[in-house]
Image: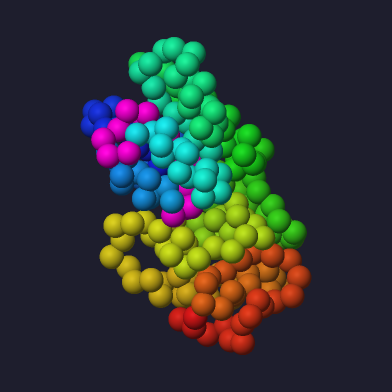
């Protein structure tokens, strides 16, 4: 799972990122509200951990702008203000939970797990399934009807992203930013290449039709007919 932590206190941000990465989450970071808003707007995260007092755009404003754009990523607000009014303001803006500074690492991790479970982002014991496709996140293994897919790391991450956003269109940019990250030196056509690789492994089990191409936009995972406005499955087609 990929998380975004937005905090302008550099030492605290380092701690947040480290403890989350130690729990095997992938974590992107931003130290201004402006950068945090831009990254959150890409719609590639499973959870946002967001400080309220930020330079550029404050946390409450970020929450409001994201919700106004129908970006429903769960949000955990960090606040140094321990007043009912401040907490209510954040929740009313659309945040899902809050954590008061200073906080215990154990509580941060517990609230993170709770929000991911609440949003259906974390299955029981890290397991996810859609039709005959089954993933075990603890071991990064994928199966179709109990037959192993033998996925590479990137193939697993790609299939996991599809399962977490099943029956939703994912743009090529969303997939690239999610799997390879904002700072990656890879070129965007790598998305088409890895979708091609993944389809080949699904095809061996008769399930390549689950990944549909949306011409000029991206891809989606959905049972049923094979293509959405697609004439070709060639690598790099758009």
Residue 138: give x, y in percent of width and height: 55, 43
At 69% from the left and 52% from the top, the residue drawn is 129
Q: Is residue 221 left or right of residue 113?
A: right
* Residue positioned 36% across, 56% down in the render: 181
User: Taking 92 as reference, is 229 left or right?
Assistant: right
> What segment is highlighted magenta in the picture?
42-57
Of residues 219 and 86, the one drawn nearer to the viewer in this rendering: 86
Is residue 90 visible in the rendered structure shown here? yes
Is the magenta region chiefly helix, strand or loop?
Answer: loop
- What residue is drawn where x is 41% and y is 39%? 62
Q: Write the residue at 48% across / 27% down.
A: 90
Q: Position of residue 34 (x, y in %)?
A: 31, 44
**149 and 228: which one is in front?**
228
Is residue 9 found left or right of 92 in the rendered image?
Answer: left
Q: Quadrant of residue 28?
A: top left
Question: Looking at the picture, does residue 171 appear above or below residue 123?
Answer: below
The outermost residue toward the top is 83
Q: Is residue 215 above or below residue 142?
A: below
Is residue 152 visible in the rendered image? The answer is no
């Amino acid at each position: 799972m990929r998380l975004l932590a937005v905090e302008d206190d550099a030492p605290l941000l380092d701690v947040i990122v480290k403890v989350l990465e130690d729990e095997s989450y992938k974590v992107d970071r931003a130290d201004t509200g402006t950068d945090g808003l831009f990254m959150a707007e890409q719609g590639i995260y499973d959870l946002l951990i967001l400080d309220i007092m930020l330079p550029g755009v404050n946390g409450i404003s970020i929450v409001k702008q994201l919700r106004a754009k129908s970006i429903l990523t769960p949000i955990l607000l960090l606040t140094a203000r321990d007043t009912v009014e401040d907490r209510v303001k954040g929740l009313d803006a659309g945040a899902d939970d809050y954590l008061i500074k200073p906080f215990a690492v154990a509580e941060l991790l517990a609230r993170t797990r709770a929000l991911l479970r609440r949003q259906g982002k974390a299955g029981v014991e890290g397991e996810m399934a859609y039709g005959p496709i089954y993933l075990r996140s603890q071991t990064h293994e994928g199966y179709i009807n109990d037959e192993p897919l033998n996925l590479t790391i990137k193939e697993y991450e790609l299939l996991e992203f599809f399962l977490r956003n099943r029956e939703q269109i994912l743009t090529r940019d969303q997939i690239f930013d999610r799997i390879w990250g904002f700072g990656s030196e890879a070129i965007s056509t790598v998305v088409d290449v890895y979708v091609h690789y993944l389809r080949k492994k699904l095809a061996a089990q008769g399930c390549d039709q689950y990944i549909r191409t949306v011409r000029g936009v991206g891809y989606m995972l959905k049972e049923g007919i094979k293509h959405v406005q697609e004439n070709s499955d060639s690598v790099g087609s758009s």
